[in-house]
Image: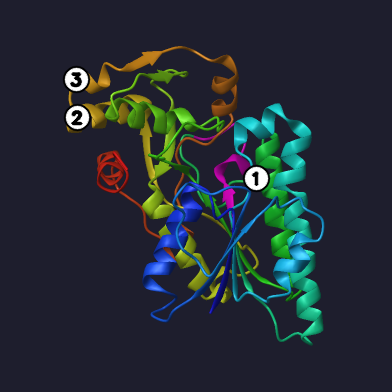
Amino acid sequence: MRILILGAGGMIGQKLAARLARDGWQGAPAEIVAHDMAYPPNPVPVTRQLTGSVTDPGLMAQLAADRPDIVFHLASIVSGEAETDFDKGWQVNMFPCWELLQALRAEHDKSGGAYRPRLVFTSSIAVFGAPFPEIFDDEFLTAPLTSYGAQKVICEQMINDFSRKGFVDGVSIRLPTICVRPGKPNKAASGFFSGIIREPLNGQEAILPVPDTVSHMHASPRSAVGFLLRAAELDTAELGARRALNMPGVACTVAEQIEALRDIAGNNVVALIKRQPDPLIERIVEGWPRRFLARRAEALGFKAETSFHEIVRTYIEEDLNR
């Protein structure tokens, strides 16, 4: 089994590569090809580790020529950066997806239709836009209010169409905010959701840029890897014409996040959270859904945590002090 991971140097990419390197694919060893612009100091050992940008000319044709059985497309710039650097957002988050699909289609055609890889794309709940009902379900429309959300929903639709034509067998998974993310803060508008847990647990001050009444959906990095693996193995005939799925998660307010941290780590840790309003972050987060039901995904076997306490404990178990 040949597996390509685009964005393999990132946090989720590394955790996915580690799981595949450890367990293989469905019990058999897997050939793992990793691609990213950079990797951590001690990356997960894989079959081949490639360095470069997804915007490099000819890259997708080169990668597709190996005819991977499964492609995990995780590569993108984050929401905050896509919003502040308009051109970069489109060049990184949308156009490479088109080039990838065209390259896989070319290999499909060369094979006489025999080659049809599974493509798993990490989309986002940013594809939705206000006004939101208090709780919505799988039928809610996509109407993004950020450039990042627009880029993600366009990729979803391209994957739907290429799958409909039989060139690829694609699945888009709309991730809730992945929390608690280990490592250093990034430019994601949602980064503070992890920061207000991660930094205090590491003895550092954390900035809270939004009111603690803000409600949001979360899942751990462990769950994110589980989502990707489930999307790669499921029978896509069960999806029908709609190949984008809302992933399950824990819906809670920032205040509930903080109380979970207090229950687990105590008042002294929570005291490291400092309130510092940021109008740009508030505006972006206001355009994201607060609570949704993921009945389709759950019926297909996708699973996440059921409480924010579980998410905090997962971070402590897997990533604290590593």
Counting from the top left corner in percent of width and height, residue 47 is at 53, 70
Q: Residue at position x 49%, y 73% from top?
A: 233
Counting from the top left corner in percent of width and height, residue 257 is at 32, 30
Q: Residue at position x 61%, y 70% from top?
A: 240
Q: Residue at position x 45%, y 12% from top?
A: 276
| SS of the residue under disc 2 | helix
Q: Is residue 217 above or below residue 305?
A: above
Residue occupied by mark 3: 267
How many labels were placed on the picture? 3
Return the mark for residue 265.
2
Q: Which residue is nearer to you in this view: 253 or 106?
A: 106
Q: Residues within 10 Å of mark 1 (few under 14, many from 20)?
A: some
Left or right side of 118 for 134: left
Which colouring convention does the figure follow? rainbow
Q: Residues within 10 Å of mark 3 (few under 14, many from 20)?
A: few
Q: Amino acid at mark 2?
A: Ala
Q: Amino acid at mark 3?
A: Asn
| SS of the residue under disc 1 | loop
Q: Earlier in the sequence, mark 1 or mark 2?
A: 1
Residue 128 belongs to the span the image colors magenta: yes
Q: Which residue is nearer to you in this view: 153 or 201?
A: 201
Q: Which residues are magenta?
A: 122-133
Return the mark for residue 277.
none
Left or right side of 249 for 137: right
Counting from the top left corner in percent of width and height, residue 181 is at 41, 40
Residue 130 seen from this side: no
Residue occupied by mark 1: 142
